[in-house]
């Protein structure tokens, strides 16, 4: 045993010297969000609004790619609440995503909940918001994700960075607005104003004093992080006399292009560079609606902020007439040509592989239907067209949220009666989606219906708007789903599958139930690999060693000690391991992602500590060898390629450690099996 340990240590030291992995360490940030009522004055009126920490917008989270966020949310209001981290890829932390009754039950009044997740492979701008009813009208804030320490933007470093958060404001309690719409079956009342960073701006009454000011100086190039936090309204955004160079969207870099106006659907973010290349003055930033639906009422007002040059003449003061900001032209409300030209300008910064072999081909029609008025409802509750009630649907199904268990909890715990899995993958009836639609198709069915996807499957989704009642533009929000990837040595569509990317011994084949766990999403600048180890020991014996999340040092001789710091050894637990001296790490904080005693699967990810490998994720599976007497262990991993290193260097480095661990596991398990056999009758 000792000779094996020394041999492996020697191998690792050689690899370390050749790879020269030098990394800045990711951080664990801890925050507290208190959801509370706060008096807020807008449009000449003070009202009690729901905020986080008394701020509107709420606190900005500034992190680096690879950092972990731990946020305790305390609910001190009379409504249920959750927080959704919009656009964050929840890599095996789906329970931290936040949609009420989808991934979690709501935080009840007086309760609290701690979200913990890691930013992995994303840089740019995202945002967070409440995901319970219409609380997000005022409960929202910015997430700024900068490159890792020592890495740079793929564009010239800006002199300043400013978040521009577009929102909506009601002179009423937004919860009451949506409840009234639900009661009457009609559309919700339009907002009374749009806002920039919580302020309506000069064009609204009682608002000039607090108009948002964005500083710039002649010759500067600054970064604006623009977010549409409005509930329902796509918005145009422009700056008078200035061009905008788009460099990112939704925490992904794009090939830069220049435009005078951008359009954002609700929930979208766009990063733009703006140059101080105009005469020093004050210029309006302005946003107003893009409305593609015909005959639909909308808020047609305009919100403004002011881009102010440092050397600009002083603004008007009491009794003094100063220069007014320059107002930009804005597209017409229904200017679809401008929107189309803008949308078609987006290009990936790097080549994106698209899967050609599709496992699931889905076709979803989306529309705003009408339900007939129930016989027991008075006319006051059926104020949609011709005495009906509005209801949205996909494939003629109007989704109903569960009331007692979240969908994720019901799935994980096998709770019956919460949802069904019969959501149709195609429309139940094909028709002319954009022509005159029979009113018999206006009324959808209701249900909590889901469509099951096999883990690792390649999915194509076609979205088709319909002219049922009111055709309009659509936006798809993919929560916690990612579509980037590749494969170590060989490029494979968007997902990497162990069996198609790595050569296994000729006598080893993976059961489908095992191979599915080794499907990894691979982002640019990552590598992945796998190690296979045969052992002359029963699966149960080997599993008794592997499953001990609290005792990895039993066979991982590069680890000196281990302490579980959060949890009791079940999924979600955190351990802190100390590494033997001489290796390129001092300690590592690791989270247990999967522990499946039935299928013999364990997965963990590195989330912190003094380690040199970022975004490391590992999956270990065990299955019986072909003769039924031994065990085949497979450990696959994904990890970032450090700056200055190649994928080959990185994979050789990690491969060596994993291989030594599995060799040690085999020797220990085989010795245990021999001991057990010697005591057998």
Image (cartoon, helix red, strand yellow):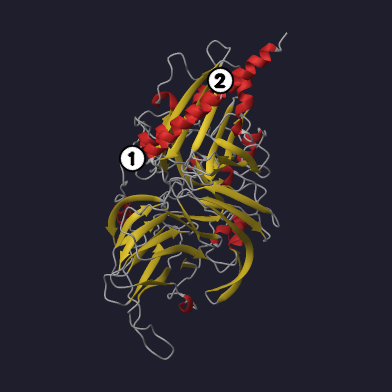
Tell me if mark 1 has few (under 14), some (14-19) or many (20+) residues whose alpha carbon lies within 10 angstroms of its own. Answer: some
The numbered disc on residue 302 is: none
Q: Is residue 43 visible?
A: yes
Comparing 353 with 19, the one in front is 19
State the residue position of label 1: 352
Q: Label 1, secondary structure: give it.
A: loop
Q: Position of residue 312 (x, y in %)?
A: 33, 79
Q: Quadrant of the N terminus?
A: top right
The answer to whether 58 appears left or right of 307 in the picture is: right
Q: Say which residue appears at 40% left-offset and 60% top-offset.
A: 225
Q: Quadrant of the C terminus?
A: top right
Q: Is residue 94 above or below residue 676?
A: below
Comparing 511 with 331, the one in front is 511
Tell me if mark 2 has few (under 14), some (14-19) or many (20+) residues whose alpha carbon lies within 10 angstroms of its own. Answer: many
Q: Mark 1 or mark 2, which is nearer the start of the sequence?
A: 1
Q: Say which residue appears at 66% left-offset and 58% top-offset.
A: 75
Q: Is residue 667 above or below residue 487?
A: above
State the residue position of label 2: 623
Q: Is residue 461 visible?
A: no
Q: CA distance from mark 2 to mark 1?
A: 35 Å
Q: Is residue 466 above or below residue 341?
A: above
Comparing 646 with 596, the one in front is 646
Of all residues, the one furthest to the bottom in this rendering is 319
Q: Tell how many labels.
A: 2
Answer with the quarter of the image where residue 41 lies: bottom right
Q: Label 2, secondary structure: give it.
A: strand
Comparing 536 with 469, the one in front is 536
């Amino acid at each position: 045993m000792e000779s094996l340990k020394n041999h492996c240590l020697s191998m690792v030291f050689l690899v370390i010297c050749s790879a020269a992995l030098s990394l800045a360490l990711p951080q664990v940030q801890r925050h507290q969000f208190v959801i509370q009522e706060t008096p807020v004055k807008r449009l000449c009126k003070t009202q009690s609004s729901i905020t986080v920490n008394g701020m509107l917008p709420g606190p900005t989270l500034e992190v680096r790619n690879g950092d972990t966020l731990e946020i305790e949310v305390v609910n001190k209001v009379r409504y249920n609440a959750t927080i959704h981290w919009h656009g964050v890829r929840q890599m095996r932390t789906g329970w931290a995503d936040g949609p009420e009754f989808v991934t979690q039950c709501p935080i009840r009044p007086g309760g609290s909940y701690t979200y913990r997740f890691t930013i992995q492979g994303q840089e740019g701008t995202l945002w967070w918001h409440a995901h319970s009813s219409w609380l997000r009208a005022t409960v929202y804030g910015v997430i700024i994700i900068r490159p890792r320490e020592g890495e740079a933007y793929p564009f010239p470093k800006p002199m300043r960075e400013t978040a521009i958060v577009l929102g909506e404001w009601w002179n009423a309690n937004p919860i009451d607005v949506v409840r009234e719409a639900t009661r009457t079956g009609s559309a919700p009342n339009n907002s009374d104003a749009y806002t920039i960073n919580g302020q309506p701006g000069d064009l609204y009454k009682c608002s000039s004093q607090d108009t948002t000011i964005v500083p710039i100086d002649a010759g500067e190039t600054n970064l604006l992080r623009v977010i549409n936090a409005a509930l329902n309204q796509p918005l145009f955004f422009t700056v008078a006399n200035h061009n905008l160079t788009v460099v990112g969207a939704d925490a992904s870099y794009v090939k830069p292009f220049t435009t005078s106006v951008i359009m954002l659907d609700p929930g979208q973010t766009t990063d733009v560079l703006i140059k101080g290349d105009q005469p020093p003055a004050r210029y309006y930033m302005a946003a107003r609606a893009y409305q593609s639906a015909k005959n639909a009422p909308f808020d047609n007002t305009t919100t403004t902020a002011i881009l102010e040059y440092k050397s600009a003449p002083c603004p008007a003061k009491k009794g003094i007439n100063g220069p007014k900001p320059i107002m930009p032209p804005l597209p017409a409300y229904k200017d679809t040509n401008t929107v189309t030209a803008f949308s078609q300008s987006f290009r990936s910064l790097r080549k994106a592989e698209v899967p050609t072999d599709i496992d699931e081909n889905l076709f979803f029609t989306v529309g705003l239907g009408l339900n007939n008025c129930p016989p027991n409802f008075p006319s006051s509750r059926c104020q949609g067209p011709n005495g009906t009630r509005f209801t949205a649907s996909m494939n003629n199904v109007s989704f109903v949220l569960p009331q007692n268990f979240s969908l994720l909890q019901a799935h994980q715990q096998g709770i019956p009666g919460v949802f069904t899995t019969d959501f149709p993958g195609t429309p139940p009836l094909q028709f002319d989606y954009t022509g005159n639609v029979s009113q018999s198709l206006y009324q959808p069915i209701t249900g909590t219906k889901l469509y099951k996807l096999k883990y690792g499957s390649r999915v194509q989704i076609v979205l088709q708007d319909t002219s049922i009642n009111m055709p309009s533009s659509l936006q798809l929000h993919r929560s916690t789903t990612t579509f980037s990837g590749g494969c170590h040595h060989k490029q494979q569509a968007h997902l990497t599958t162990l069996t198609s990317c790595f050569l296994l011994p000729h006598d080893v084949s993976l059961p489908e139930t095992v191979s599915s766990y080794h499907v990894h999403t691979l982002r640019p600048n990552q590598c992945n690999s796998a190690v296979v180890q045969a052992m002359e020991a029963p699966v149960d014996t080997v599993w008794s060693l592997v499953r001990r999340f609290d005792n990895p040092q039993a066979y991982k001789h590069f680890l000196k000690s281990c302490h579980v710091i959060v949890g009791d050894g079940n999924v979600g637990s955190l351990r802190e391991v100390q590494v033997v001296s001489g290796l390129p790490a001092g300690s590592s904080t690791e989270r247990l992602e999967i522990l499946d005693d039935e299928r013999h699967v364990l997965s963990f990810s590195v989330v912190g500590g003094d380690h040199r490998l970022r975004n490391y994720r590992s999956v270990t599976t065990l299955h019986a060898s072909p003769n039924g007497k031994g065990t085949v262990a497979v450990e696959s991993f994904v990890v970032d390629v450090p700056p200055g290193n190649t994928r080959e260097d990185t994979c050789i480095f990690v491969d060596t450690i994993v291989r030594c661990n599995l060799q040690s596991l085999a020797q220990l398990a085989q010795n245990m099996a021999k001991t057990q056999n010697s005591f057998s009758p």
